[in-house]
Image (tube, helix red, strand yellow):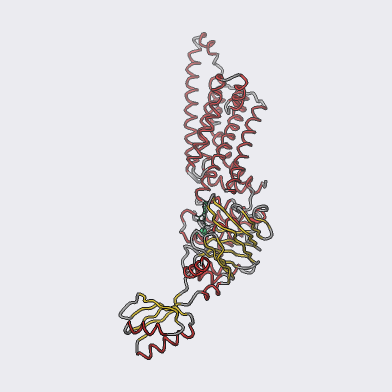
Amino acid sequence: MIEVENLTKDYGEFRAIDNISFTVEKGEILGFLGPNGAGKTTVMRILTCFFPPTEGKAVVAGFNCFEDSLNVRKRIGYLPQRVPLYEDMKVSDYLRFVAAIKGTPAKEVNRKAAKVMDDCGLGDVSGKLISTISGGYRQRVGIAQALVNDPEVLILDEPTVGLDPKQIKEIRNLIKDLAGKHTVILSTHILPEVSILCGRVIIINKGKLVAVDRPENLTSESSRRMFLRINGNAQMIERELAGISGIKEFETAQASGEANGYIVVFDDEKRGRPGIQSMIEKNNWELMEMRPLETSLEDIFIKLVTKEEA
Amino acid sequence: MNIRNIGIILGRELRSYFSSLTVYVVILMFLLMTGYFFYNLLATFSVVSFQAQTDPMLARQYQLLNINETVIRPLFGSISIILLMMTPLLTMRLFAEEKKTGTIELLLTFPVNDVDVVLGKYLACLVVLLTMVALTATYPILLVILGDPEVVPIATGYLGLILIGAAAISLGIFTSSLTENQIVSASMSFGMLFFFWLISYSVPLVSAGLGQVLSYLSINEHIASLSKGVVDSEDIIYYLCFIVLFLFLTLRSLETKRWR
Ligand SMILES: Nc1ncnc2c1ncn2[C@@H]1O[C@H](COP(=O)(O)OP(=O)(O)OP(=O)(O)O)[C@@H](O)[C@H]1O
Ligand SMILES: [Mg+2]
């Protein structure tokens, strides 16, 4: 559905993206991960025909983004990162305008706008001026305008930023429901979001493609970490921890109360866990807390990026 | 070109114009200024014609008992200058604001041709201009009620006003496409319009050939005969070329923005 080949974009002297290639199948949800300034927005702007690449080509739904831009634009819905909307319009008027400009037949415009408002939970604010609605609702209006024409391809630049947890869940469900019929590319900084939504993830850093993989593989590839809080003699605990097989490394961590806190990194969790268990029992210490730590996006970045540079 | 898309853009722009205070203030100021000129011209006319009733010398000297020559023609002259002063304030937001707020990113990724965007915006501004010009019709209507002016020069004078205003707007939409700063856009429009206005002042200073070119380029030379009631196709063509040229430049400027 989307083919990107050797895409490069220069802003003057500065190379924002460098020789990126990937493809997206029909019905797939692709996650775009990368730290600030990685070039995610730049790739999306090329795919939405806002500007052409310096080199390389992008093909969406069989049409070249540069040579056949109108045909591409007919088939995409785009949520820009800054969510630029016409502040002086009412939500419902704005969505009707977008529906119309995207080619909805005149007598369908009202129905489509009403449906998308319903889908995005905008019923309460439909009569309000966009300049007066809250940030989360703005975000929803942005998503609504991308969805209004039921486009084949959706390109969403950080779609869940600024939403409350309930709304994040709703929007994620909305995006999930789109899979299969629609092809979606979304960028995000939130790792769990990728695991929940995306079939595949692309990681870019400083304009270069670092990894393309399934989200499970990315999280499992980076080592599992666990937080421990143990009541006992600190020196002895540290000596014992160092001796347990399956634990790669550990460090002391801030812990509340009298107990000592540790962050343990496993290289083999199956052997490490029982090791900790028996250590506690043997020394008659008290295990106050033991919980897995989320692998953060930073960990993955650091891992992948350092791997790349090494 | 797609008429429906032009219409949709036009509708949105018009709604946006008339939901902001700017347009009302601009129209009000325009009417106050033109009204002031009209009042003065009319007052002078009535004083002089009152005196001329008792003083045949004065009457002959001025030959001014013709209301068309003494009120209407100077009135059109002033209205056209004021129009040139006001149009940059109408056009400055057309693209500059969209660039500042970022809405251009969505606008240019909607499935519409750039031509349709430019024409939709241009026509919206033209509607505002026509509203302004139409409101000044109160002055000649008053004259028709009070006196007995010739109607043809009034009609062609209005054609001239519309053409010069339409030309000014096309220049304004171009400068708006060059920048994301509305003040910069308005300043450039003022500068360029006054250049096209004042260029005729250089005519006596240069050789005859060059002088002819300069006076042909001058934006106000071409309404002179229209406000006398003479429709010369050369004048109409001048304005149409002016409009097409700047709309074309606007289109190119949008395209190069894509090329950044
Ligand atoms: N118009 C521009 N002119 C010059 N440089 C730009 C322009 N737009 C973006 N850049 C630069 O290109 C790089 C990539 O920017 P981009 O917006 O694509 O990053 P991003 O991955 O979307 O980051 P974020 O997560 O912060 O949104 C950045 O270093 C940025 O400074
Ligand atoms: Mg971005």
Visible in this render: residue A145?
no
Q: Residue at x 64, y 33 (%)?
A: B241
List x then y, in percent, for residue A25.
Answer: 65, 67
Q: How many labels, in total?
A: 0
Visible in this render: residue A116?
yes
Eyeballing the image, is B62 above or below A29? Answer: above
The residue sitting at the front extreme is A310
The residue sitting at the top extreme is B57
List x then y, in percent, for residue A115.
Answer: 59, 62
The residue sitting at the left extreme is A258
For residue A77, what is the image quadrant?
bottom right
List x then y, in percent, for residue B204.
Answer: 56, 19
Eyeballing the image, is B243 above or below A175? Answer: above
Q: Residue at x 59, y 19 (%)?
A: B207
**Quadrant for the N terminus of chain A in the image:** bottom right
Q: Is residue A21 left or right of residue A265?
A: right
List x then y, in percent, for residue B167.
Answer: 59, 34
- Give the camera-side residue of B193 and A258: A258
Q: Residue at x 64, y 62 (%)?
A: A2
Eyeballing the image, is A99 above or below B36? Answer: below
The residue sitting at the bottom extreme is A282
For residue A26, what is the image quadrant?
bottom right
Eyeballing the image, is A303 above or below A287? Answer: above
- Give the camera-side residue of A193 and A258: A258
- Give the camera-side residue of A309 and B184: A309
